[in-house]
Amino acid sequence: MSRPTSSAMPSPASDTADARRVFEENIDAIHKRDRARYLATYLHSSSLARNGPAGLDLGYETWSARRDSTWPDTLIAKNLRVLPLVPGVVYGTYCYTGTQKDTTSSGVSERVFVKTNDGWKIAVTTAFGLPVGAPPQCK
């Protein structure tokens, strides 16, 4: 299991660049439907937090994405942004539009990246879709 680590004075710029690489890896794995690469970007821990309209769920072992075989037919991720919070912790967000089985939804997704002994991992992931008919919030 990966555990967050603290290191002596990492630079916010290097934390941000490292977390962004993991963020881009995560999105690319979705595009390529590569489950192993996708899951490798997440913290394999009982503290992995997943949140959305249905509420908060915790834990890697109980996460449906570990065995779910569905992927969006298309995913457009734009306005990818990262912001260092404290050494070893970076917040990220992006706007998404995804289509799956003729249903298109848009919203905002967030990630919190933590530096661990196994490299940077996603410790928190969210996705909040917009209500049907709502104008896009991200431009």
Image (tube, rainbow, N blue to C red):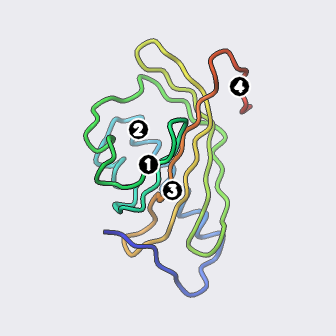
Circle 2 packing at 10 Å, graded few (<14), some (14-19), many (20+), is: some
Name the N-terminal-most of marks 1 and 3: 3
Kind of residue sitting beneath label 4: Pro
Cα gap from disc 2 to disc 4, whole angstroms: 22 Å
Name the N-terminal-most of marks 3 and 2: 3
Where residue 23 appears, as percent x and y from the top left, is: 51, 51
Q: Are marks 4 and 3 in contact (CB under 8 Å)?
A: no
Cα gap from disc 1 to disc 3, whole angstroms: 25 Å
Q: Are marks 1 and 3 in contact (CB under 8 Å)?
A: no
Cα gap from disc 1 to disc 4, whole angstroms: 26 Å
Kind of residue sitting beneath label 3: Arg
Q: Which residue is mark 4?
A: 136
Q: Are marks 1 and 4 in contact (CB under 8 Å)?
A: no
Q: Nearer the viewer, mark 1 or mark 4?
A: 1
The residue nearer to you, when weighing 96 against 15, is 96
The residue nearer to you, when weighing 39 against 125, is 125
Q: Is 81 left or right of 64, judged from the image as shown? A: right
Q: Which residue is mark 1?
A: 57
Q: Nearer the viewer, mark 4 or mark 3?
A: 4
Question: Up-down: is 121 above or below 105?
Answer: below
Name the N-terminal-most of marks 1 and 4: 1
Tell me which residue sits at (28%, 48%) in the image: 36
Question: Up-down: is 121 above or below 34?
Answer: below
Kind of residue sitting beneath label 2: Ile
Question: Up-down: is 53 above or below 132?
Answer: below
Q: Which residue is mark 2?
A: 30
Element under label 3?
Answer: helix
Q: Nearer the viewer, mark 2 or mark 4?
A: 4
Q: Which residue is mark 3?
A: 21
Name the N-terminal-most of marks 1 and 2: 2
Cα gap from disc 1 to disc 2, whole angstroms: 21 Å
Name the N-terminal-most of marks 4 and 3: 3
